[in-house]
Amino acid sequence: MNDAGKLVSIDENGHLTASGINEEDLIISLLQSNNYLLAGAVGLNINYANRTFNRLQNATALSMGSDFDQFLMYGGRKRCNVDDDGTITAFYGENNYVEDGSNGQVMVYQPKFYYKRLLLETETASKGQIIRHESLILSPTKYEGFKVAPIFSTSEGELDYVLLSAYEGTITNDKMTSVAGSKPTTNITISEAETAATARGNGWHITNMAAEATNQMLEIVEFGSMNG
């Protein structure tokens, strides 16, 4: 019973024996190794104490920018025009794509992805846990132990994609808009902004922590740094 949770190995006599390492430790070790790659996965090892960063998984030899376009959560991210009912009317590069609002709101199409945080060094504090060293790994595929990025999780299930604002919000005719050339509306409350966003139709909202967390994870891994 003392060996519960340990992986099983076989000794030189063919007997089953506890391996001395548990499954979570093995997963951490494998995901930190450049010899064990998950298809489509990219990551970053973040040592907060030493302020050092090392790329992991398929990101090891990459630089920020077009190198990451091969991964769906990056290369599949593109601007588009969206009707109030959520219909995508055009993607960037298509003939009818415009940014003046005449073909719908200007949004950023973001495909779903999953993430895994490996906590490598922590401290217990009076108000919670302090993370000193961790690794963050992103993947378009849901591997064992990975969670879907927060913005794609709903009470009805996981979303295949979300539409993020391409521009800061401007209220026009009592509705929040995301179009080029408009100055953001200021001096309003969060409640007033949300009302203007939902006035556009079902599913429209102002940004929230789930959206910000999604963007931050993508940024940190691609830039290879916490300096945004």
Image: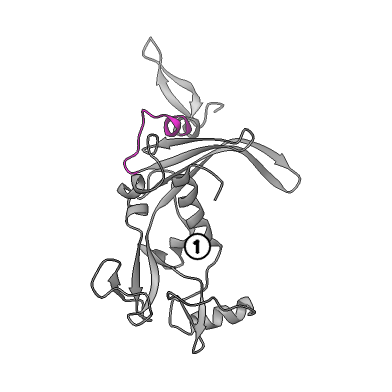
Residue 26, image x and y in percent? 46, 30
Residue drawn 56% across the image and 26% down it: 2
Residue 198, image x and y in percent? 49, 81
- Note whether residue 141 is visible: no
Residue found farthest to the right: 126
Using residue 35 as the reference point, say whether residue 187 is left or right of it: right
Residue drawn 73% across the image and 42% down it: 125
Type of the residue with mark 1:
Ala
Residue 130, image x and y in percent? 67, 42
> Between 162 and 169, which is closer to the camera in this rendering?
169
Q: In this view, does 194 lie above or below 28?
A: below
Residue found farthest to the bottom: 173
Q: Is residue 85 above or below residue 71?
A: below
Using residue 122 as the reference point, say whether residue 221 is left or right of it: left
Residue 123, image x and y in percent? 68, 37
Residue found farthest to the top: 13
Using residue 123 as the reference point, say whether residue 193 is left or right of it: left
Q: Is residue 47 above or below residue 83?
A: above
Helix, strand or loop under label 1 = helix
- Note whether residue 150 is visible: yes
Main SS of the magenta segment?
loop
Please say which color scheme the image uses: one colour
Q: Is residue 159 above or below residue 68?
A: below
Give the residue at mark 1. Answer: 211
Extent of the magenta region: 28-40
> Between 72 and 93, which is closer to the camera in this rendering?
93
